[in-house]
Amino acid sequence: MFRFVQTGFFIIAVSSLLAWSSRSQPRVLTQQSSSADEVATVPWRDGGRSISQLKGGPETVEPRPQFVSAKFDRTLVHSIRESSNFLKQRWAEDPERKPIPKVYLESLELDASQISRAENASNDETVSRQQLNSMLKDVADDLEIKASHCKSSSKGWASLISVEIKTLKADQSPAKGLAVWYVPKGWADTKDRWLRCSKLSTPTNAGNLPPGLYMLRVENFAPVPIRIGGDGKDTQTVELLAP
């Protein structure tokens, strides 16, 4: 069980997510400090060059033909396209060409690779349509949160969120000394994608995270899905009930 309380990164041609090469290996999310001054960034133009090296380049907007197949829910494909196009537009219209939080770019790369995983899995007859669309839904939800946060944030689409995590006992008193782990939801089944908060609870801090859909867990207990961001606020507090 869990509950969360709202306490109030660059995107480069995000439509390239739909043209990610199946050979590309996404980078593991960079663990960020809670201090905004310590957030690693890359220049706006460097990010553009990085995305242009992906298969299809930043001009590619439409999914490859095999992506829009009978196995994929067209509503999800449309949602991914809409969010990607919106974020691409916001990137292109940034008059300041501000530096890009590196962790935001890495988050987009994980979404792109998840799409590639779904494409490859669609050729496997043992993988059901439900399984394939579950993978796409994680991407669609993640990008929708990013787009919503972009619309609402006073800092624009490049903002990250400082995430504080509290672990509680059943009586709502603090449950101290527990390790808290987190990962983008689409990669929850990949052990080495999980990151542990830098200190034991409670509270602890996951650092500055891109808006998106995550899985959080206390120690080795069952993870729970959490939406990070989407409302434009710079901070968020998550309260997890310790088993």
Image (cartoon, rainbow, N blue to C red):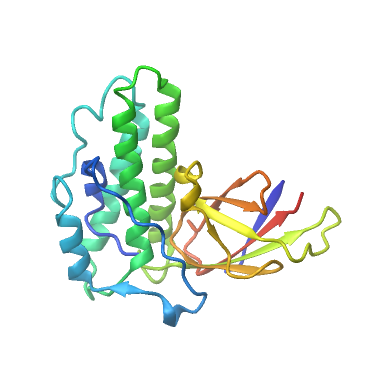
**3 vs 107, nearest the viewer:** 107
Name which quarter of the figure residue 107 lies in.
Answer: bottom left
Q: In the image as oriented, which residue stretches furthest toward the front?
A: 192
Name which quarter of the figure residue 235 lies in.
Answer: bottom right
Q: Residue at x 18, y 63 (%)?
A: 48
Could you tell whether 222 is left or right of 113 in the image?
right
Could you tell whether 205 is left or right of 10 in the image?
right
Q: Position of residue 17 (x, y in %)?
A: 26, 46
Q: Position of residue 205 (x, y in %)?
A: 59, 69
The image shows residue 181, relative to residue 34, as above or below, that is above
Q: Residue at x 21, y 36 (%)?
A: 63
Q: In the image as oriented, which residue stretches furthest toward the bottom?
A: 37
Name which quarter of the figure residue 169 lies in.
Answer: bottom right
Q: Residue at x 44, y 43 (%)?
A: 141
**130 vs 182, nearest the viewer:** 182
Q: Position of residue 127 (x, y in %)?
A: 40, 22
Q: Residue at x 45, y 78 (%)?
A: 36
The image shows residue 118, relative to residue 110, as above or below, that is above
Could you tell whether 201 is left or right of 182 in the image?
right
Q: In the image as oriented, which residue stretches furthest toward the top?
A: 125
Q: How many marks?
A: 0
The image shows residue 172, relative to residue 127, as above or below, that is below
